[in-house]
Image (cartoon, rainbow, N blue to C red):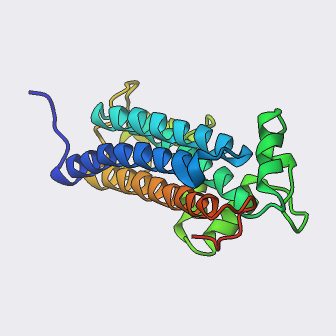
Amino acid sequence: MEKEHCQKVKLGLERLERTDDTILANSSEMLKANNSEFYSFDLFAVGALKRAISLSKGFRILIQDWNLVTARAILRLQLDTLLRFSAGWLVENPHKFAEDVLSGKRIDKLVDKDGNKLRDNYLCMELGKKYEWIPRVYQQTSAFVHLSGRHIISALSDFNDKGMSNKITISAIDDKYPDSSYIEAVNCFQETTDIFLTYVKGWTITKDKSITKITTSRP
């Protein structure tokens, strides 16, 4: 009999699937705002929304298949979507920022209105002022994007009293982790997506007021 996730994980995945509908609804609302006027920042938002819903689908499949190692890497990518989209609230001209990104310029080489480079660490610090968990989760999940000690540990189990592993498992199935690890990953992905959608809503409201520069306060 195939192993099943606990009820909290199942409910979390169901909520994430419903959030995909919210992503599509917010996309439509944004594009229709201000009589469907289209700004450069809309292009940046469209790319972020597409990425967010694609990552959400992949994340759910990985969790369902008990592939927590890769799911954590996907969570890190969703955090990246949030971090870089939020940069639009820090720059002097968000539309010029969007055009620079579209032209191929690296976001971490661009600067905010105070001259700070938009590196991930800086964006994490800024978001961390309101969402204190973001820098911590960013650091933890980054270890799953790049080959690191976390991948080595994930292949080891059955540690003895001297801290030595008695078992090596090379498998795509990560069923040795407790339910709490899966619950935490699902909840973090949900929260990251929800915050991202708050920023999308903020841009939609600004656009609907026919303001060509983002002037609303940070969500």
Quarter-of-image position of residue 156: top left
Residue at 21%, 46% in the rendered image: 10
**Image coords of residue 129 (percent x, y):** 63, 75
Quarter-of-image position of residue 121: bottom right
Residue at 78%, 40% in the rendered image: 101
Q: Nearer the viewer, residue 89 or 36?
A: 36
Residue 177, relative to residue 83: is it above or below?
A: above
Q: Quadrant of the C terminus?
A: bottom right
Q: Please indicate whether residue 116 sits to the left or right of residue 195 in the image.
A: right
Quarter-of-image position of residue 164: top left
**Image coords of residue 39 (percent x, y):** 70, 46
**Image coords of residue 216 (percent x, y):** 65, 71
Q: Nearer the viewer, residue 202 or 144?
A: 202
Q: Residue furthest front?
A: 35
**Image coords of residue 152 (percent x, y):** 52, 36
Q: Nearer the viewer, residue 158 or 205?
A: 205
Can the viewer see residue 5? yes
Q: Please indicate whether residue 82 sits to the left or right of residue 116 in the image.
A: left
Residue at 52%, 59% in the rendered image: 201
Q: Nearer the viewer, residue 85 or 98?
A: 98
